[in-house]
Image (cartoon, rainbow, N blue to C red):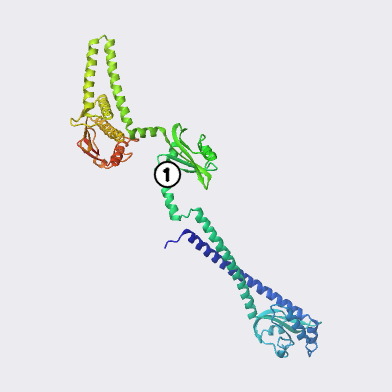
Amino acid sequence: MKVKLQTKIFLWITVILLLSGIVTMFLSVQMMFKNTNAALERNLFNIAETVAKLPVVIDELNYPPFDGGIQKQTLNILDSSADVDYIVVCNMDSDRYSHPNPQLIGEKFVGGDDKDIVTSPKRYISTGHGTLGVSVRVLVPVFNAENKQIGFVCVGTLRSTIQNAHQQLVLSYAIYLCSGLLIGIVGVFFLTRSIKKSLLGLEPEDLAKLYRENKGMMEALHEGVIAIDKEYKVTLFNESARKLMGIESDFLGMDVRDIMSNSRLPYVVETEEAEYDREQILSGKVIITNRVPILEKGKVAGAVATFRDKTLLIQLVEELTGAKHLVEALRASTHEFMNKLHTILGLIELDRYEEARNFILDIHKNQQELNKKLFHTFKDPIIAGLVLGKFSACKEQGITITLSPESHIELVTDSDLSHTLVTIIGNLIDNAMESASKNKDHDGYVLVGILQVENEILIEVQDNGSGIDEEDMELIFERGFSTKGEGRGVGLYLIKQELDRLEGSILVESKERITKFNVQIPY
C-alpha cells in the first residue's frame, strides 16, 4: 500500500514526538524520584533533630517515668508535617515513649535497626519493618544537659506513602506528556498540510519524475533557456544556453546582469511585460529571443527567456522550405553564365567576333534545348528551375547528370507539397553530387528520374560515388549522422521527416559503389 507524503511525515513526526516525550519523561521522573527521596530524607532528619532537642523529650527521658508529654508533642508535630507517618521516641532500652498508636506506648521498638543508635550515638537512615509496615526512617540520638545519650528519636515515612507520591508524580508527567503530544500532533497536522500545499499536492515520486522529465526536456532543447527570480538570480539554465553564451562555468545563483550585461530579463521582471522575437547580440552572435514574466498568484516571481542563433534559424528555415536548394541552383546557373560571359568578352577583346557570335549561338541553342526539354518534362516551374540549377552545378563540378527519359510531372497546385518536393529532390541530388565528386576515376555521374503516375510521385536518384557502408544503412536517416564531418547529417533526416508526414517511403540500395535512392509519395 502506497503511503502519501503527508501521512508519512505526520506518522514519523508523531512517533518522534512520542519517543522523545517518553524518554524525557523517564529521565525527568528518575531525577524527580532522586530529588524527592533526598528532600524526604532531609525533612525526616530535620524533624527528628527538632524532636530530639525538645525540653519535654529530654526531661521525660532523663527523669522517668514519663507522663505523656512526649506523646502530646509528637502528635502535634506529626499533624503539621507532610509526608511523615510516625514519630517514635524511645529510651536507651528501646521502650517507646510515643507512637501514633497510643496502645503501643511502653512496648519495645520493632524493626531491629535500633541496635546501632543505642551502641553508637550517630544518626542514620534505614529501611525497617515496624508495626505500621515497611518504611524509610531516620534515627537520631537524644542527649541530656551533660551530653549523655538518654534515648533516640525515630521519624519515618511508610513505603506505601512514598509509592503514592511517586505515582502522583508519574501521573502528572503523563498528563503533561499527553498535553504536549496533543499540541505537537495538531502542529504536525497543520505543518504537513502546509508542506502538501507548497508541493502542489504532489508526491515525492511525482516530483522526482517531473525533475527528470524537466531536466531531459531542457537538455533536449536546441534553444537556450535561462530563468531568473525576482532578485535577478539565475534559477535555471540548460546546456544550449551555456554554449550560446560561451560560458563553461556554472552560473546558477549568480546575478544575470553579471553574466549578460545587456540582458533584458530584469526589465521584464520590473514591467511584467513579455517580449517576443527580439534580436540581441550575445557573445558576438545575433540571437532571436523571447522573454516572458513568471507569475505566481498574480505577482511576478521571475522571468524566463528562450533564445537561438539567428543564423541557424535561417539555415533551418531554408532546409525546411527548400529555399536553400533554389538559391544554390540560381547561384550555379549565375556562375555558369558568368563564365560564358567572360569567354565572350575575351573573344571580343581579341577581335574574334565570328567565334564570339558562334559561341553565343551555341549557348543559346543548347540552353533553349535544355530549357525546352526540362519545362516540357516538368510542368511545375519550381521543380523545373531546381533541376535546371542542378544541371548547371553538375556541369560546374565536372559531373555528368542525366535525366531519365520517363521523367514527367504535372503542375503541383499544393504549395506545401511543392516546397516538400524541392526539399526532397534538392537534398537527394546534392548528396549524389557530393558522392559522385569523390569518384577516383573522375567519371562521376548522377542519374535523376522524377515521374508522376496516377496517384503517386516516384523519385529516383543514382550516383557512382563512394557508396554507403552496410553498417551505416540504419543510421543515415538519423539527425546529425554523417561521415562528412560535424555540422552535417540534416538532409536525409529532413527527407525522412517529410516522407513520414506524407505517409511516403524511401528505399536505399548501395552495391559496388552504385547508390540508388527510390522515393514514393502518395499524390
> Total number of numbered labels?
1
Q: Nearer the viewer, residue 271 or 360?
A: 271
Q: Residues within 10 Å of mark 1 (few under 14, many from 20)?
A: many
Q: Residue at x 68, y 75 (%)?
A: 40
User: Is residue 412 found left or right of 112 in the rendered image?
Assistant: left
Q: Residue at x 36, y 34 (%)?
A: 317
Q: Residue furthest front?
A: 413
Q: Is residue 335 visible?
A: yes
Residue 276: where, in percent of width, then height? Answer: 46, 36
Q: Residue furthest left?
A: 405
User: Is residue 519 found left or right of 109 in the rendered image?
Assistant: left
Q: Give the image quarter of residue 55.
A: bottom right
Which residue is tagged 1? 218
Residue 216: where, in percent of width, then height? Answer: 40, 46
Name the quadrant of the N terminus: bottom left
Q: Residue furthest top?
A: 351
Name the quadrant of the C terminus: top left
Q: Eyeballing the image, is 474 above or below 24? A: above
Residue 50: where, in percent of width, then height? Answer: 76, 78
Q: Amino acid at mark 1?
A: Met
Q: Is residue 441 visible?
A: no
Q: Residue at x 53, y 56 (%)?
A: 194
Identify the secondary structure beneath mark 1: helix
